[in-house]
Amino acid sequence: MKNFRIIALAVLTLSATNLQAQKYPSKLLGNEKKIDGIISQMTLEEKIDMLHGKNMFSSAGVPRLGIADIEYADGPFGIREEMEPHSWNSAHLTTDSATFFPTGSALAATWSTHWAYAYGRAMSREARLRGKDMILGPAINIQRIPTGGRTYEYLSEDPLLSGMLAVAYTRGSQDDGTAVCLKHYALNNQEDYRGFVDVHISDRSMHEIYLRPFEMAVGEADAWGVMAAYNKVNGRWCSENEHLLTTILRQQWGFPGMVISDWGGVHSTVDAVTAGMNVEMPGSRYMGQALLDSVKAGKVSEAVIDQRVREILRVRMAVKPIAKEEANRVPVGNKEEMAVALEVARRSIVMLKNEKLLPINSKRVKHIAVIGENAVTKMALGGVGAGVKTRCEITPLEGLKSAIGNSMKISYAPGYKSFDRGSRNRRQSPQQAANPELMSEAVKLAKSADLVIYFAGDNREVETEGSDRKSITLPSGQDELAIALAKANKRLVTVVVAGGPVDISTVNDVSKSLLVSWFNGSMGGQALAEVLTGKISPSGKLPMTWPIHLEDVPAYATGSYPQNIQNNAQGDIFVDITQNRSNERRQQLVANYSEESLVGYRWYDQKQASVAYPFGFGLSYASFRYDQLEVQPTAEGFDVHFQLRNVSSADAEEVAQVYVSRPSSRIERPVKELKGFQRVALKAGESKTVTIPVRRSDLCH
């Protein structure tokens, strides 16, 4: 312990950080005798029937014994609309709306365990009204590549930040009565070729970086469900990987709950069920009749089947079933949940740059030009994968108009045409040239305004499950438009709407102020307007590094991503998630995680490489001072104490971050690693004593 050195201190939060120190005993182990009695009454056919999907988002119970089906809620950031029983088509109900919560990277940008807990609890309340037992989330894979199709769903490049937020989300949901299903276990860090890539990684890197968030959510929050990923890890499919599902998950971590497959992600019968797979979703190709035949042939013992059923029943008994006639009767997306979405969105917005244009000066600014289709584009739906049929989504333009009222004139021009599904289906690239007519209209408007707010970035068609972005260049000619706008009006504010990093080199150069507002949920437009007008101070911090060039990213720099299939260009691959026939691929792709544990900021620190903006960065309208730093050893590790003062005239929240270094280590370690953080609210001039615990378990290798 004495050889560790605290080398960086940035910012802080609420007493909800006590979440990190508590260990939860599992609530799943209190009904073992009752479960014994149920299993003893079940036929083999009834047991097998519980081990595969009944329809697209449910698996069977045992009606004659009073065991209800398990209903799954798709989407970690909102409860997906109801689907037809055996397809991906909408059921076209009128009562299956939901709140669109800020997506994973936005939640992570809050660096708040308090609001992650509230987020999970709000998700659970809506799941219960919709008759759901298990949320397919949180999605907690490490953001290894900024281009990942699901980077917007995932939390962070850092395992501690991801893990602490996953713990809080899990506790919030399960305290309210809905099981979580941690996904995607494990190392599902890319969407291209996700169904047949084999990840090769060392044990140390796997445990320290990629498994750590899962371990924390299981050990500290008693997560009741885990979803096995599509890919292979060190030669075995995740759905039949005994090392992952039994040795690590059940034996080392003591997980007593159930494992379900990603949809279409099972590849065998005997290997899957014996390795620890409980439920094949959504069909029964391997764990239906084939499993029944395998048991009768003596290839799988009935004791294994009983154990898999026991693990399901533990979860079923912990979650109160909702009668089907009671589900989807009350509309969701109500005020309480919308309020949580708003509070999260407020704290997620990251200000990267501000040369005195923000907050908007109502005395100087009388006419605002709002440019960019992302000012009016709704992000609840789009692309491939889970979305939310929400009753409300306030766009940035709507939020600004509501906040400003009649005090200023607001004019809008689209400036560019966003990438859409039709373009993607035609295999067109988002990297199209600027539209001359739209650009001319936008430039004309910019010249007439006192302030230009330019909405750049991606949308849910550019960042989508099933395929990774091929670049981080802003789509639709947005860089060209940014240059033209800056020439027309130097008072340019750029807001980047995206789920992950984009190349901001151009907009950063030409803009006086620069913010990131993410895919920020139903209330995102209101939250952004409050930041722009100064009602609240921006307080979000980047949960991932924003690189200058894509080739600087460790997975790209080491040549381990992207992979290519002979005679099949990567750009032509669009994975059909409804037909994930991964086991039918003849060619195996290997992803060597050559950077080992040097993911994200760990790599850039080690290589002394420049970045656009670093992990943990974010500006405020307020200024803060840190004083009286002390470090005291404790039984669990050590506590970092200091005084934090708001030395400005603006009320604000600050996120304090503790990084640890061990330069004299006999094993290779990163230059620094995040080992603690808090979010702290401070009124103008206020000072607080802050304590951030650093745990021994987080210092281990």
Image: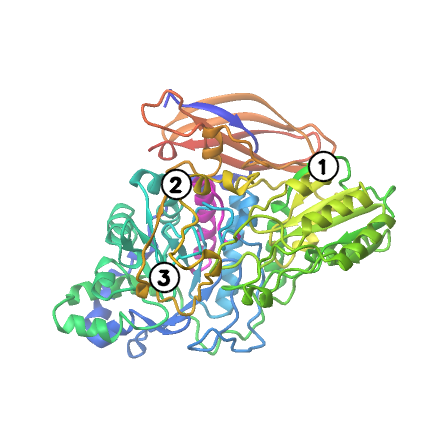
Q: Nearer the viewer, residue 509 or 311?
A: 509
SS assignment at label 1? strand
Residue 254 in picture, x, y percent from top left: 28, 49
Mark 3 or mark 1: whose residue is earlier in sequence: 3
Q: Main secondary structure of the magenta part?
A: helix
Residue 564 in picture, x, y percent from top left: 40, 53
Query: Relative to residue 468, is residue 692 depicted above or below?
Result: above
For the N terminus, the image quarter is top left
Q: Nearer the viewer, residue 469 or 78?
A: 469
Q: Is residue 160 magenta?
A: yes
Q: Is residue 16 visible?
A: yes
Cα gap from disc 3 to disc 2, whole angstroms: 30 Å
Q: Is residue 524 magenta?
A: no
Mark 3 or 2, which is nearer the eye?
Answer: 2
Determine whether, in the image, residue 137 is placed left or right of residue 243.
Answer: right
Mark 3 or 1, which is nearer the eye?
Answer: 1
Query: Label 2 belongs to which residue?
Result: 209
Query: Label 1 belongs to which residue?
Result: 354
SS assignment at label 3? helix
Residue 461 in picture, x, y percent from top left: 57, 61
Mark 3 or mark 2: whose residue is earlier in sequence: 2
Cα gap from disc 1 to disc 2, whole angstroms: 34 Å
Magenta-highlighted residues: 152-179
Residue drawn at 82 percent across, 41 percent down: 361
Proximity of marks 1 and 2: CB atoms separated by less than 8 Å: no
User: How is colour applied across the structure in the image?
Assistant: rainbow
Mark 1 or mark 2: whose residue is earlier in sequence: 2
Q: Residues within 10 Å of mark 2 (few under 14, many from 20)?
A: many
